[in-house]
Image: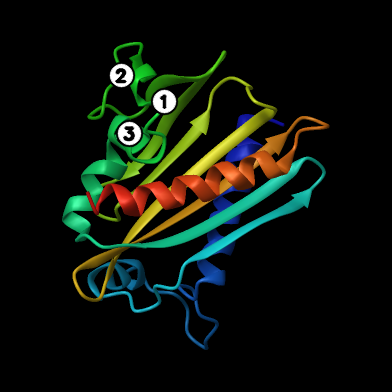
Amino acid sequence: MSATTSLSTVLATCTAALLWTGHVAADDRAPRADDSAARKVACHDDTESVFVLTPIGEGQVLSYQRALIDAPIGEVWPVLRDIEMFVEAVLPDLAPTFMWLDGGGPETIPSRFQFSAGADTLVEEIIYRSEAEKQILVRLVEPVLGMQEYYAFGDLTRACGDRTVLEYTRYLELAPGTDIEFFRALFTQEFIDIPAYFEE
């Protein structure tokens, strides 16, 4: 699968995730340019936790998670936008192995980085970030852990009560024989760890 095809797929699945959560409603008018901005300003009252992990094709998996974080968006965004801090929040045992690559860093887009899980090293790249929309898109650079392709799209929304909703959509293309349950357990633990990170 080409990088272009993969990116098209992940953007399509992100749109599907927004449809699942009610952000894109079917109505009689065309969407306006200010719809997304309005959604970001208003407080989000749909805060129920959600986790969907489902095959969408041969070797292809879509994951969608939504979690409520008991902290204002102004405190959560600095952690999501700086992937080194995000790794510390969701993968604290792996955080000491984190390293920026090729002169990259939290203020440079695109930027590559790596961290290690046992004998495996994951090399990923931030390819998109929006300060206004509080969104970030990351991709896997080199196949590892059975993943041939991996994209992760993070999106923050203000929740009522000075809290934050984190939505995370992931597209994975897996090698034959890769156990999908490994990723289900990993993603579940990550979304236990990140709300706990802000409770400390």
Drawn side of residue 142 relative to residue 130, left or right: right
* Structural crowding at the residue carrying mark 1, measured as other residues with C-alpha within 10 Å and reported as few (<14), some (14–19) or many (≥20): some
| Residue 42 point in image, percent of width and height | 25, 76
Residue visible at 72% across and 42% down in the picture: 180
Q: Which of 23 and 100 is in front in this view?
A: 100
| Residue 170 point in image, percent of width and height | 56, 47
Q: Is mark 2 on a helix, strand or loop?
A: loop
Residue visible at 51% across and 33% down in the picture: 139
Q: Name the residue under label 2.
A: 104
Q: What residue type is labelled 2?
A: Gly
**What whole-number distance in Å separates the C-alpha atoms at marks 1 and 2?**
19 Å
Q: Which of 24 and 120 is in front in this view?
A: 120
Q: What residue type is labelled 3?
A: Glu
Drawn side of residue 52 relative to residue 92, left or right: right
**What whole-number distance in Å separates the C-alpha atoms at marks 3 and 1?**
7 Å
Q: Which amino acid does label 1 sit on?
A: Leu
Drawn side of residue 186 relative to residue 59, left or right: left
**Lower sequence index among marks 2 and 3:** 3
**Lower sequence index among marks 1 and 2:** 1
Q: In which quarter of the image is residue 182?
A: top right
Q: Quadrant of residue 145?
A: top right
Q: What element carries label 1?
A: loop
Q: Name the residue under label 3.
A: 88
Q: Mark 1 points at which residue?
A: 94
Quadrant where the N terminus sits is top right
